[in-house]
Amino acid sequence: MQTVSRTPGPRALAWLKKEALPVLAMLGLLLAARDTLANHYRVPSGSMQPTLQPGDRVVVDMRAYGLRLPFTSHALLAAGTPQRGDVAVFDSPADGTRLIKRVAAVAGDRVDLRDGHLSINGRPLRLDGAMPREDFGTRAARLDLDLGGGPDIHGMVVPAGKLLVLGDHRGNSLDGRFFGFVDADKVYGRAVAVYYRRDDGFGWQRL
C-alpha cells in the first residue's frame, strides 16, 4: 500500500512564503495598529445623550493617553492623562464591560453634583441658556436632564490616580456614582468624533 505524503511540496511552500505570509503579516500589523493607535466603538445605550446616540460609531484615539503593547494593557509610552471633559473609553471596574463616559473630575478634585449639575472645587460648571450645558474649559458638554439628574454627590474628593466618570444623560446613566472611580492609567483612549449615525449616515462630528 502506497503512503501519501502530507508534507507540503516545494510549490506549496514557495506559495506560502511569497503570498500567504506577507498577507498574514500585513493583517497582523493592521490589527496591532488598531489596538494601539486608533480604534472604533459602537455606542450601546443612551447614557451619553445628547452627545452620543445609541448606535453611533465613534473613532477612538488610542494614543491619547499613551502607547500600549498591542493586545495588552501594558503601557509603552506615556503621552498624557485624561482631562475633565474628555469622552473616554474604559472597562467598567464592576464587571469589565467596555464603556464610554465623560471624565467629570480628576485626582484631587472635590465634586458636588446636585440635580444633575456639577460643581468642581466649589466652581459650578453650569452654563446659562435654554439647553442644559456645562463648561469643562476646553469644551462645553450638553446634558439631558429629562429624567432628572440621578443620584447627587456631596463633597466627594477624587483619590490620586483615579477619575470620576459620568454620563451626559445624568438621570439615565450607570456611571461612577454606581461603580466607583476608574483608574486613570487603565483608560483605553479618547473618543474623537462620531463618524456614523443611524439617521444621518456617514459624517464627522467632533466631540
Image: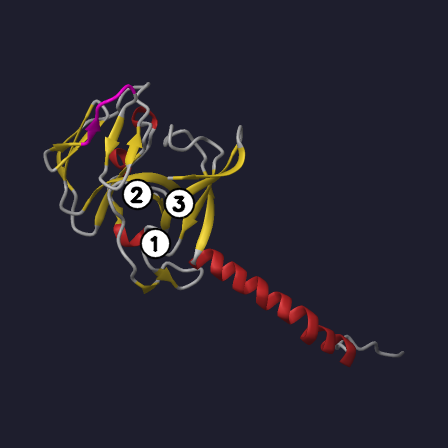
- Between 80 and 187, which is closer to the camera in this rendering? 80
- Name the residue carrying label 1: 64
Toward the bottom, the furthest residue is 10
**Disc 3 to disc 1, C-alpha distance:** 10 Å
Instruction: Tell me which corner region of the image, top left, top right, bottom left or bottom right, holds residue 66.
Output: bottom left
Residue 138 appears at what percent x and percent y? 26, 42
Picture residue at 42% right of the left edge, 48% below the top: 60
Instruction: Tell me which corner region of the image, top left, top right, bottom left or bottom right, holds residue 22.
Output: bottom right
- Name the residue carrying label 3: 192
Three-letter amino acid code at the position of disc 2: Asp
Q: Is residue 131 magenta?
A: no
**Residues drawn in magenta:** 125-130
Q: Secondary structure under badge 3? A: strand
**Disc 2 to disc 1, C-alpha distance:** 10 Å
What is the crowding at mark 3: few (fewer than 14 residues within 10 Å), some, or many (at least 20)?
some
Check residue 127 in the rendering and tell me which mark sits there, or answer none. Answer: none
- Name the residue carrying label 2: 86
